[in-house]
Image (cartoon, helix red, strand yellow):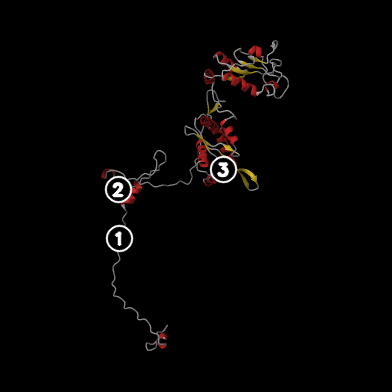
């Protein structure tokens, strides 16, 4: 493009508009280019040299970096005076491995018999899952809250062709193995003198299309730092009674918590023993303790101790050995034996006898209640 003539005015000059005067350029000089040496801060070196893991818990892969200064030198020409360690956090593509168990099959030449060693027995009999995999899946699911489908995705990405239902069934089998541990821990919590309990709402079970019910976990904490998470469908107080084996009107229950020696020890220190006609009544009598004994099919005159309050049924009873199955099934053919029902022996009568004994009052009724003189059965 040709330059405009120097004598030609600009549009601004033709219109009488003042144009700004460009500033005078400052003189410049050229500086030769140069490169600076990159320095590494000592603080960064110190940070990479500090271990940030437990050496006894984390696998460590060691990589030795050769020193370029000894390239071409023989071992006689240098001496290693120490090492410097640098630690980096890394990740491998997959954390799963396959254990291949090889069992040679041999044939004895002397007997011409073929033998092969048995495969090691796994925690889950007949399962392809090793104990380490089962433990890892439980930790991923319940400690890190990793869903089963994500565990399945991770296995597939690592090159394993496994079905998701197999993982679900495997988890159910593992939980079944842990049930005895849960039961033992919960029994320890029940035996604690002081317990802590709370309820935590969760969404579980279908309420309708696309809706879940609000149900509850009941975390229970014991004196020895045990904790269990029983599940209940609501917050009703009856669940507490059920979990702890409590009975309405009973302050302390020792049901299924004592062995025979502990039972004898408690009987020895008791003021009164209330029971049906059974073995503990005989133990209490041998210890010299008094009992209130509720009779049913057995004979009062034969099994009753004179120092006890023996309560005979008002209806039926005394049917022992009338049939071969009298100990298991009512001899009269009733689904619930009449002789031990409330209609035959009223609970209030038993309570009144107990109150009279504990108050050191004389029982006005005869020692053997409801016994007839000739009411003796023959085996």
Q: Where does label 1 land, which residue? A: 36
Q: Mark 1 or 2 closer to N-term?
A: 1
Residue 179 in sight from this viewpoint? yes
Q: Where does label 3 land, which residue? A: 201
What is the x, y in percent for residue 198? Answer: 53, 38
- Number of other residues with Cα within 10 Å of mark 1, as a class: few under 14, some 14 to 19, many 20 or more: few
| Quarter-of-image position of residue 31 | bottom left
- Residue 89 in the figure: left or right of residue 160: left
- Number of other residues with Cα within 10 Å of mark 2, as a class: few under 14, some 14 to 19, many 20 or more: few
Q: Nearer the viewer, residue 365 or 30?
A: 365
Badge 1 marks a residue whose secondary structure is loop
Between the residue at mark 3 and the residue at mark 2, the CA separation in whole angstroms equals 68 Å
Q: Where does label 2 land, which residue? A: 70
Q: Nearer the viewer, mark 1 or mark 2?
A: 1
Badge 3 marks a residue whose secondary structure is strand
Between the residue at mark 1 and the residue at mark 3, the CA separation in whole angstroms equals 65 Å
- Residue 258 in the figure: left or right of residue 40: right
Residue at image location 59% in from the left, 21% down from the top = 355
Q: Are marks 3 and 2 in contact (CB under 8 Å)?
A: no
| Residue 149, placed above or below residue 20 | above
């Amino acid at each position: 493009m040709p330059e405009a003539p120097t004598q030609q005015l600009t549009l601004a000059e033709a219109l009488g508009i003042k144009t700004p005067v460009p500033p005078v350029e400052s003189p410049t000089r050229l500086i030769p280019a140069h490169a600076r040496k990159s320095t590494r801060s000592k603080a960064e070196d110190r940070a990479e040299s500090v271990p940030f893991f437990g050496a006894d818990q984390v696998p460590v892969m060691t990589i030795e970096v050769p020193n370029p200064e000894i390239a071409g030198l023989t071992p006689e020409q240098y001496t290693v005076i120490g090492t410097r360690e640098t630690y980096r956090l890394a990740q491998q593509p997959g954390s799963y491995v396959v254990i291949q168990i090889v069992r040679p099959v041999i044939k004895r030449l002397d007997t011409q018999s073929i033998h092969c060693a048995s495969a090691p027995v796994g925690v889950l009999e007949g399962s392809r899952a090793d104990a380490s995999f089962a433990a890892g899946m439980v930790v991923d699911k319940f400690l890190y809250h990793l869903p089963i489908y994500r565990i399945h995705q991770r296995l597939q990405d690592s090159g394993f062709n496994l079905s998701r239902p197999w993982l679900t069934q495997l988890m159910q089998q593992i939980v079944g193995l842990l049930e005895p541990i849960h039961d033992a821990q919960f029994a320890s919590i029940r035996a604690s003198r002081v317990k802590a309990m709370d309820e935590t709402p969760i969404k579980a079970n279908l309420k309708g299309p696309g809706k879940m019910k609000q149900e509850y976990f009941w975390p229970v904490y014991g004196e020895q730092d045990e904790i269990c998470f029983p599940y209940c469908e609501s917050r009703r107080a009856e669940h507490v009674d059920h979990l702890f084996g409590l009975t309405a009107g009973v302050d302390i229950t020792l049901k299924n918590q004592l062995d025979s020696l502990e039972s004898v020890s408690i009987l020895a220190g008791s003021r009164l023993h209330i029971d049906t006609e059974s073995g503990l009544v005989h133990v209490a009598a041998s210890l010299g303790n008094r009992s209130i004994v509720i009779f049913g099919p057995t004979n009062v005159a034969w099994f009753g101790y004179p120092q006890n309050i023996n309560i005979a049924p008002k209806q039926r009873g005394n049917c022992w050995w009338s049939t071969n199955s009298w100990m298991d099934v009512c001899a009269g053919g009733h689904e619930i034996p009449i002789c031990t029902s409330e209609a035959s022996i009223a609970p209030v009568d038993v309570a009144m006898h107990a109150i009279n004994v504990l108050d050191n009052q004389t029982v006005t009724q005869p020692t053997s209640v409801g016994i007839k003189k000739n009411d003796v059965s023959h085996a």
